Image: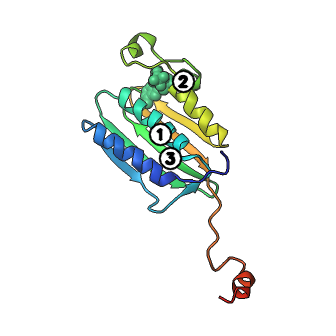
Amino acid sequence: FSNQIADAREIALQVFNNFKMIHPEFVFVLDNDLKQATPVKVYRNHLEQVLIILMDNAVKYSKDRLEIHLSVSKNDRYAEIAVQDFGEGIAQKDIDRVFNRFYRVDKARSRDKGGNGLGLSIAKRLIEGYHGQLTLESVVGQGSIFRIFVPLAPAKPTVDSKNKSEISSNGR
Ligand code: ATP
């Protein structure tokens, strides 16, 4: 799939807006928006799936402060999509483990929330399959921030920078 190109910003906003419609009890805040297409080297459905897993968790593991923040930014190599919640948070000792298959932080408590502990392991594998990264910062009782980093696709050459001799030899 490495030759696939998708617009990270458009996909992030689409999933964000879908969750906004499905969860009117939550406040959705767009913290940062690039306001321009952000092509990345990822198969569209895979990035969409990862965002759904993260936002679904943000909804499942929030209780008092029902708020989800999205931020879309980039550096010279990666687009970064951050999903932040203000829910129960994850203890330091569990931060790496939550990406393991079938790991759930509190088995008794999470049982009523459904799920098998697979979402995050799938999300991490998908992103790493594209040479990206999925990171987590969290504080118990305060919430979590998951950041997706995916490699930017090279900018499309503009008409001006295309081989001009080819254009002129066509008589245009
Ligand atoms: P599913 O298989 O449906 O995804 P799941 O939510 O249990 O079920 P993961 O998405 O892999 O599985 O998450 C693993 C565990 O990490 C969860 O059981 C939960 O304890 C913890 N977790 C994940 N996201 C959050 C979050 N945003 N806030 C707090 N805890 C979280």
Determine if the C-beta at disc 2 is less than 8 A from ligand 1.
Answer: yes
Tell me which label, 1 or 3, sits earlier in the chain.
Answer: 1
Q: What SS does tag 1 mark?
A: helix
The verdict on label 1 being within 8 Å of ligand 1 is: no
> Which residue is painted at 30% across and 33% down in the image?
65
Instruction: Tell me the quarter of the picture where residue 83 sits.
Output: top left
Question: Badge 3 is on which residue?
Answer: 81
Question: How far across and down, in percent of the image, does residue 87 sit?
Answer: 37, 30
Q: Is residue 57 visible?
A: yes
Mark 2 or mark 1: which comes first in sequence? 1
Residue in the image at 65% along x and 45% along y: 1
Question: Identity of the amino acid at label 1?
Answer: Leu
> In the picture shown, does residue 111 fall above or below 157?
above
Measure the C-alpha gap from mark 2 to mark 1: 16 Å
Mark 1: few/some/many CA within 10 Å (<14, 14-19, 20+):
many
Residue at 29%, 42% (x, y): give it. Answer: 21
Q: Give x and y (percent) for residue 134.
A: 57, 38
Viewed as shown, does residue 24 lie left or right of 150? left
Q: Amino acid at mark 2?
A: Val
Q: CA distance from mark 1 to mark 3?
A: 9 Å
Residue 91 visible in rendering: no
Q: Which mark is residue 51?
A: 1
Residue 54 coordinates in the image, percent (x, y): 46, 35
- In the current view of this chain or complex, which residue is farthest to the bottom? 171
Say which mark, if any, is on residue 98: 2
Q: Amino acid at mark 3?
A: Ile
Q: Secondary structure at mark 2?
A: helix
Classify mark 2: residues with Cα within 10 Å, few (<14), some (14-19) or many (20+): some
Give left or right: position of 132 versus 62: right
Residue at 30% in and 34% down:
66
